[in-house]
Every structure is written in C-alpha cells, then in structure tokens.
Amino acid sequence: MRFKTRNARVIPHFYSILYAIFLVPFTVTFRMTLRFDFSIKSALVLLVAICIMPASLIAFALLSYDYLRARDAQIDSSVMTARTIAYSVDKEFSSIETTLRALATSPSLSKKDLPAFYAQMSEIQSSGFMQNLVLSTLQGKQLLNSGLPFGERPPISDRTNLRLLDETNGPVISGLIKDTISNQALIAVSIPVRRAGKHIYNLSAYISPNQLARLLKQQQLAPDWIVAIIDSQSTIVARTHDMSRFSGKQASADLLDAMKFDNQGWFEGTTSEGTQVLGMFSRSAVSNWSVAIGIPSASLTGEMRKKVGWLALAIMVLLLSSIGVASFVATRIALPVRGLRAPALALGQGKDVVIPSLRLKEAKEVGAALRQASLMLQAAQHQATHDVLTGLPNRALFNDLVSRQIAISALAGTQFSVLYIDLDGFKPVNDIHGHAAGDAILCEVAQRLRSEVRDSDMSARFGGDEFAVILIGTPGKTAAKIANTLIRSVSEPYNFKGEAVRISASIGVASYPESGAVEHELLRMADLAMYQAKDAGKGQVVCASASGLHLSA
Ligand SMILES: Nc1nc2c(ncn2[C@@H]2O[C@H](COP(=O)(O)OP(=O)(O)OP(=O)(O)O)[C@@H](O)[C@H]2O)c(=O)[nH]1
C-alpha cells in the first residue's frame, strides 16, 4: 500500500532540478567569461567553485531525496503499526465478547438462578481481565453487578448501550463511561442475552482504559512516539504519554481533520499537548476505534539535520581547501607570467632581454621565444645599420652619428672631422683576381681603418669601395695627418693567395664647424674634397676649409 506523499510530488521534478543545478551555473559562468577579464586566480577559484557547487547541490538533493524516501518508509511502517495496534484492540474486545457470549449461555441464567450466575460472574471478574460484569434488564436496571456484593445495586441505571442492543446482536462497545461504583472512567462491552430468540437481558463487561494502555506498552514503541487509542466518538481512551491528562478528551484537531475522509493515512500537525509531529492513523472497520501514532518532527528530522550539518561542513572544508590549492596554483602560474613583463618591455625598448628563473614550462617557452625574438631584432637592427660584408656601420648609421656629434659639439664647443675615403685602383683587383679577392681586400681595408683610429672614433663603409671615418674632437689639421696615416696603411700590400695586391686611397677631410655646420653640408664638403683628391692624382688628402679645398702634404 502506498500513500500520497510529498516525496511522490518531488520525484517528477528531480531530474529538472539536477538539470538546473548543472545548467544554471555553467550558463552564468560562460556569460561571465565572455563579459569580464579574469585573472588566473579568479578563473581557477571560479573553476573550483563551479566543479564543487553542483556536486554539493546534488549531494544535498540526494540527501533530501533519501530523507523523503526514509520518511515514506517510516510512514508506511507506522501506519502498519497503527493498524496492528488497532487489530489488538479489536482482539481485546472480541475476547471480552467471547467470554460474555459463553457466560450468556449459562444454565444458571436460563434457570434464573441468579446467585449461581453471580458466582460465575465473580469468578470471571477475579481473573483480573475485567473490572466488573453486569447483568441488567432491557430498561437498564442492574440485576447483578460483580463489583458489588450479591443483591446490591448501584443507585443509577446505565442506559448507555440499550438502544443499540435493541437493534443489534452486539457487541456494543461504549466510549468512556463514568462508573458509579469505582468512580472511574470505564469502557463497557455489552451483548444482548436471548432465549428462544427473545431479548431478555443485557450482559456487560467493564474494562479499564489501563487495560488498553497495557496493549500499547506491549508494542515496544519508540519512547518518544506519542500513541493514542481513540474511540468511535473521537475521544482519547488510552495514551502512551500523559494519559491521565488527555484520557476522555477529544483527539487533536489536526488528527480529526486527517481522519475525516480516510480510514488510514498520515498528516503533519500537532498533538493535543502541542508537539509538532508526523502523524499516522488507522481506524478499525470492526470497532470503529482508531489508533494514532505521532512521531515528533524533531526526532524524525534530527538525523537529517545531523547529516546536512556534516555535509555542509565537508563541503566547506572541501571548498576552502580547493580554493587554497587553486590560489597556490594560480600564484605559481601568475608569478612566471608576470616575470615575462620586464623581458617583453626590454624587447620593445630594444634592450637586452634577460629572462629570470621561471618555474613554469610554458612561461619558459615564452621566455625563450622573447629571447629569440630579441636576438632576431638585434640581428635585423644590425643588418639595417651595418655593412654585411665588412661588418662596419653603414651610411645611415654614420650619418646619424654625424648628426648627433654636431649636436654634442655645438653644445660643448668642440670640433670633429669627417674623412671620405675612396679606394684607388680597386676595380683592377676584381678584374684580375676576381670578386672574391675584391671582397677579401675590402674586409682587410675595413680592418686596417678600424685599427688606425681610436675606439671613440668610427669607421663606416658607404658601399662599393667607399669608406668614411669620423674623428671625435679632432680638428682639420690633425685629421689630415690621420688621413695620410690611413692612406699609408691602406696602401700596404695585401696578400691574396700568395700574391701581393696593391691599392691606395683618396681621402677628403671636412671638419666641424669649419667646413659645415649641418650634417649634409659637412658630408658634401668631405665628398667634394675626396673627388678633389682623386683629381689631384689619387693617393692624396684634400681638406675642405672655409677658404676652399686644400691639398694636404
Ligand atoms: N669585390 C667587390 N667589388 C665591389 C664591391 N662593390 C663595388 N665593387 C667594385 O668596386 C669597383 C669600384 O669602382 P671604381 O671606384 O670605379 O674603381 P677604381 O678602380 O677604384 O676606380 P678609381 O676610384 O677611379 O680608382 C667596381 O668595379 C665595383 O664593381 C664589393 O662589394 N665587392
């Protein structure tokens, strides 16, 4: 037998709840990730929360489901218990009826031998099972009462069951009746005594409600369960708790409401003393008496509350420890990633990229890529500003240096000179010894020029067989002397595959500020001077001064 319970209403929604548990957080998170920038830490913490929260909610849902199932089982078994107790009550009444029916057939009664019949009644009463037995007329006048000495009668007639006994063959069970002899509330079980089909007497047995309370005790019910036996008039007859207080009172309103339409079932409400209970009841179809069981809600949900408490604690610990681990991992990831900021900025500024110690594989890979990019950038920059063959600075870098030096010298009031160098007789080297020989000699020329000037000066190759030198802080005269030194150096023979190769150089000298105050003017003057040196027969030095171009001795 199943009862309609809350659980039954919950189960159809169970899968929708699970669906919502998973769908809602994931949708929210997905939208958040689209909208906001996350730090590694917040992303990991969020991830942990997303992983743990649905599992936690499922655990709570399963716990609730488990509780509802357990409550269902409790309801079913408690209704069965109520039915069993109601059956025991019926059996009690049935046993009394059997005794009464046997007594009603007594030959003493047929012979109207009332003393002998009284003796029989007394004997049954002395068994202790019944409070007393009464033989009365159809009008309710007591003829014999086993609770009184033979011949004595109570002052008031009991007419409780008379009308019913007239209509039925019994037994008729009264509610609680005030016994005029013992002054106790008792229950009367009455049958009609018939002879030749004629109703001649009524025979009743009175039992105490304690007799029924004993039945409750025999059931070994949980001590906090409040169990009551209720008569057909909804009056509490016996009870496990506070019987003296509630016996003879109406059952609680909640129980009466629940019993209005069903013979058995359950309800949630309060008992007569106001305890919140989960109540189960069963009404006997034979006697119309009921048994109600009230399980205090506190004891029913106590275990559930304990489990929920432990689960909440476990989830809290899991969540906090996971967030702690996530934070630690996030820091381990974020530190190396942040450590790449400085190298990236250095790369952008064209500075040396120094990769710090990064304890993360991916960050190390990015660091290595930054270093590689830095080297490639440096190589590209070198290529853009240097001559590929000789490695000397090219014209662009040289011009740039001249511009800067003009600015510096203008401020400092110093001088410097620029030498334009064009090799003499270089073409025949290519023609006679080949292009490779020409290349080797160009490199050697570069080397000689570099070695003849200071580190603070700079030699450059402009292309072909054209070179240039800037001499920092050097006035024109000194520059002319150095130019002659350079011609001597360049004119030294070159050894190419055992052969001595000879070339020379023509040099034009221009000095700042004498020959020009701006870069292009200064360089143009050096160029003109160099052509003048060529025209003067090569292997010469010509200086450009304010007064014109002069051959240097
Ligand atoms: N091997 C080699 N030769 C080059 C390179 N660049 C230019 N040349 C050659 O250098 C020569 C320069 O020409 P010129 O300056 O007229 O030759 P030159 O014999 O020095 O002439 P003068 O200056 O009048 O003495 C040309 O033959 C170019 O082909 C280079 O990178 N390597």
Image (cartoon, rainbow, N blue to C red):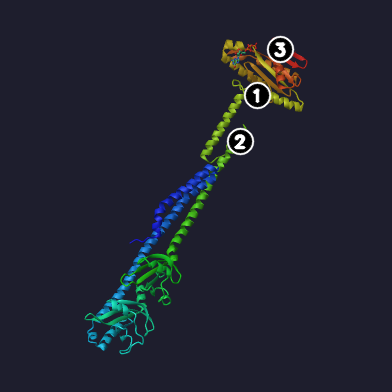
Mark 2 in CB contact with mark 3 (< 8 angstroms): no
Mark 2 and mark 3: Cα distance apart in space: 50 Å
In the image, taking residue 472 as reference, residue 98 lies left or right, namely left
User: Which is more N-terminal, label 3 or label 2?
Assistant: 2
Q: Which residue is mark 2?
A: 345
In the image, taking residue 543 as reference, residue 164 lies left or right, namely left
Q: Does the numbered disc 2 mark a residue whose Cβ is under 8 Å from ligand 1?
A: no
x%, y% of residue 414? 76, 25
Crowdedness near tag 3: few (<14), some (14–19) or many (≥20) residues, C-alpha within 10 Å: many
Q: Which residue is mark 3?
A: 532
Along the viewing direction, whichever of 432 and 99 lies nearer the viewer: 99
Mark 2 and mark 1: Cα distance apart in space: 24 Å
Residue type at mark 2 is: Leu
User: Which is more N-terminal, label 1 or label 2?
Assistant: 2
Q: Residue at x 62, y 33 (%)?
A: 349
Q: Could you tell me if residue 493 is visible in this image?
A: yes
Give the residue furthest to the bottom. Answer: 151
Q: Is residue 154 above or below residue 189?
A: below
Q: What element does badge 3 sit on?
A: helix
- Label ID, residue 397: 1
Q: Report the image quarter containing ligand 1.
A: top right
Mark 2 in CB contact with mark 1 (< 8 angstroms): no
Crowdedness near tag 1: few (<14), some (14–19) or many (≥20) residues, C-alpha within 10 Å: some
Q: Is residue 129 above or below residue 78?
A: below
Q: Does the numbered disc 1 mark a residue whose Cβ is under 8 Å from ligand 1?
A: no
Q: Could you tell me if residue 145 is visible in this image?
A: no
Q: Residue at x 36, y 63 (%)?
A: 76
Residue type at mark 1 is: Leu
